[in-house]
Amino acid sequence: MTKSAKTVYNVLIADDSENDRILLKTALLKAARLQAVAEVSDGADVIAYLGGHAHFSDREKFPLPDLLLLDLKMPLMDGFEVLAWLKAQPRRNLTVVVLTDSMQAEHIKRALDLGADLFQVKPRVNHDRDAMILALEEYILKSTAIPVHHASVHSFRSLA
């Protein structure tokens, strides 16, 4: 049996497409334990948000995310540059999911080598987007679950 460490997981959406951000926020509403806390449209703002710089310094208003949905093709700094920056930071409890239109093998390898946890082509149909968000919720819950220690039934029986 496991017990989840948190009840709500914060999500930062990083995508230069306003439509994609809206669709992701809508899909997140179907997840019981994932909550969009902010959205940014370029890689420089991802780094500013995560670093608590500029107007993102108020952690009450801009809490640290547990999950980053990261587009690869963004202005100012692309997703690869964000991943490289993240890799150079002290390890955070942050799950990074790359969402992109590209299924190029070199993009997948590079993103994973830079520390992305998952790589996903952006779903274009609402049903697929909803299913992806629910699968990510389950992934987050399983990856952050902590075991609850109970007396083993087997050891109790062996004493009898």
Image (tube, helix red, strand yellow):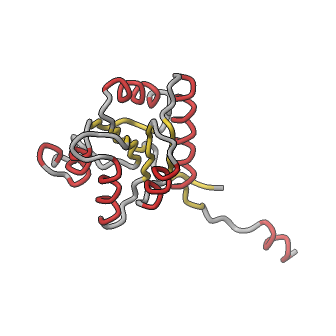
Residue 10 image point, x, y percent: 37, 43
Identity of the residue drawn at 45% across and 36% down: 101
User: Would you say 155 lies left or right of 59 here?
Assistant: right
User: Would you say 59 lies left or right of 72 here?
Assistant: left
Whether residue 29 is situated above or below residue 158 in the rendered picture: above
Closest to the observer, 97 or 54:
97
Closest to the observer, 117 or 73:
73
Q: Is residue 141 visible?
A: yes
Whether residue 13 is situated above or below residue 82 in the rendered picture: above
Q: Residue furthest bottom?
A: 159
The total of numbered circles placed on residues is 0
Closest to the observer, 153 or 30:
30
Residue 134 image point, x, y percent: 55, 35
Q: Quadrant of the N terminus?
A: bottom right
Residue 2 image point, x, y percent: 61, 55
Q: Residue furthest right?
A: 160
Closest to the observer, 125 or 92:
125
User: Would you say 13 lies left or right of 62 here?
Assistant: right
Whether residue 159 is situated above or below residue 88 in the rendered picture: below
Q: In the picture, residue 114 is in which quadrant?
A: bottom left
Residue 56 image point, x, y percent: 18, 45
Q: Quadrant of the C terminus?
A: bottom right
Identity of the residue drawn at 32% across and 38% down: 37
Q: Is residue 10 visible?
A: no
Identity of the residue drawn at 39% across and 29% down: 25
